[in-house]
Image (cartoon, rainbow, N blue to C red):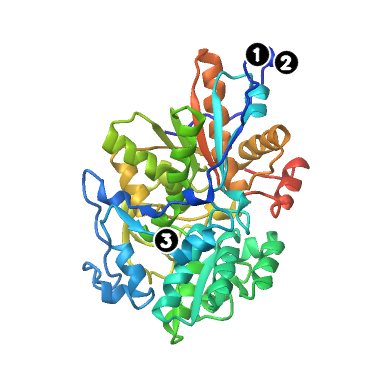
Amino acid sequence: MTRPNGSIRLAETNLNRSNGYAIMQTRFTLPQSSIPTHWYNLAADFPEPMDIPLHPGTRQPITPAEMSAVFPENLVAQEMSTERYIEIPEEVRDVYALWRPTPLLRAVRLEKALNTPAHIYYKYEGSSPVGSHKPNTAVPQAYYNKVAGTARLATETGAGQWGCSLALACQLFGLECKVWMVRVSFNQKPYRRLLMQTYGSTVYASPSDQTEFGRKQLAENPNCPGSLGIAISEAIENTVTNPGTKYALGSVLNHVCLHQTVIGEECIKQMEEAGEEPDVVVGCAGGGSNFAGIAFPFIRKKLCEGKAYRILAVEPSSCPTLTEGELRYDTGDTAGMTPLMKMYTLGRDFMPPSIHAGGLRYHGMAPTVSHAYKLGLLEAAAYPQNAVFEAAVLFARSEGLVPAPESSHAIRAVIDEAIQAREEGRKKVIVFNLSGHGLLDLASYDAYLNGQLRD
């Protein structure tokens, strides 16, 4: 469902300790020994099986051998697995220990600002070395490629969070890394590009002159802002034309969503520590990885334990894949080189507007998220970017953390849920994934604060 947009309606509030907002603990942490030992695979619990991916040329079910042209066999096995739990290698857990478990915090000051009876919790993934949730899958992807004998990884990135994460993971496991960064983000977010280069990776603005497909796009439109679909095509072309190279993707695919479930597995334990159970679970959604990370373990509890959670995916209204897309087979890239996946899509040729939430500028939604949406296991909402930044600024001024533009979509929906609880006069427990900080996105905030941000 698409929720109404508009200014955040604040209410006068008494900020003293008698109004019920003051609590003894606002931060819920777990010992390092509580880092999950297994990833959770939602495909094992779907009441209806997912549609299988097809070869883009033959339109026949794609085989593991065909997938192995771009991915190592060990990741192909995870991509096609229906096993409920997959063990996390110790080498991966050792790296996870640099930042995991991540904290769960209660947004008491935001609750006060909204004068809401709702209890708002957020799982903060911005505490990772690169400031987002993306290393949760970058680290295992680099590890499995290293084990498989890969020398070099090629990838794309939108806002740069995924590129930074893979750059770090490749450095930790001794792999070379090439990144095609969507041109509009390459220009808007130079510090993410510099962070990738600091970690030792090579970064190209996409479309680039490094690939045949990139050169074709530039010939048709020298000022092309780029898209994730184009950048994926360039990275895959580079993969198949360079021996010893494999491709790594930061969202969409089953194994990527699988790796992110460490978020929700930790969150369930932390909510138990807080002594509450959520009514609503919220995450922003572009390709689907951070949303899957928070949502899939809670969907498991819906399916296996009969829990009545509302699960809400929030996307930009300028790229409304779930709320306005079509469920059909489509490729994940513009050139049509990836497998055909059954997903909600705006079409592989869709060119998203140059919004500042670059990580959400993608034409398709993860097949696992799409299937869950089709089955009615989650809802969807869409917002324009000015309404999103309004919520982001309120969160920053209340809680002190400057959220990433992508994560701020979830914040906007959470605020609307909390205001609804206030107007209905009932308590509601809301938990959301704050998937990254916005300290490298301050140019976006500058545009909003100076009235230069357009919907």
Instruction: Tell me residue 183's x, y (percent).
Output: 62, 66
Q: Work out how far the residue at label 2 is from the one at label 1, CA to CA, in angstroms.
A: 6 Å
Mark 2 nearby-residue class (10 Å; few <14, some 14–19, many ≥20): few
Residue located beneath label 1 in the image: 19
Q: Is residue 359 above or below residue 64?
A: above
Q: In this view, does 374 lie above or below 218?
A: above
Please name whichever residue, 339 or 418, is drawn nearer the observer in this view of the structure: 418
Q: Looking at the picture, which amino acid does disc 2 mark?
A: Asn
* Residue at x-position 66% and y-position 40%: 389
Instruction: Tell me residue 80's x, y (percent).
Output: 28, 63
- Quarter of the view holding residue 52: bottom left
Q: Which numbered disc flags the more N-terminal residue, 3 or 2?
A: 2
The answer to whether residue 207 is seen in the rendering is: no
* Residue at x-position 42% and y-position 57%: 259
Mark 3 nearby-residue class (10 Å; few <14, some 14–19, many ≥20): some
Mark 1 nearby-residue class (10 Å; few <14, some 14–19, many ≥20): few
Please name whichever residue, 107 or 323, is drawn nearer the observer in this view of the structure: 107
Q: Looking at the picture, which amino acid does disc 1 mark?
A: Asn
Q: Is residue 174 above or below residue 33?
A: below
Secondary structure of the residue carrying tag 3 is: loop
**Is 447 left or right of 426, judged from the image as shown?**
right
**Is 455 left or right of 54, judged from the image as shown?**
right
The answer to whether residue 350 is seen in the rendering is: yes
Residue located beneath label 3 in the image: 348
> If the image is split into quadrants, where does the C terminus sit?
top right
Q: Work out how far the residue at label 1 is from the one at label 3, CA to CA, in angstroms.
A: 51 Å
> If the image is split into quadrants, where does the N terminus sit?
top left
Which of discs 3 and 2 lies nearer the camera? The answer is 2
Q: Which numbered disc flags the more N-terminal residue, 1 or 3?
A: 1
Q: Work out how far the residue at label 3 is from the one at label 2, CA to CA, in angstroms.
A: 53 Å
Residue located beneath label 2 in the image: 16
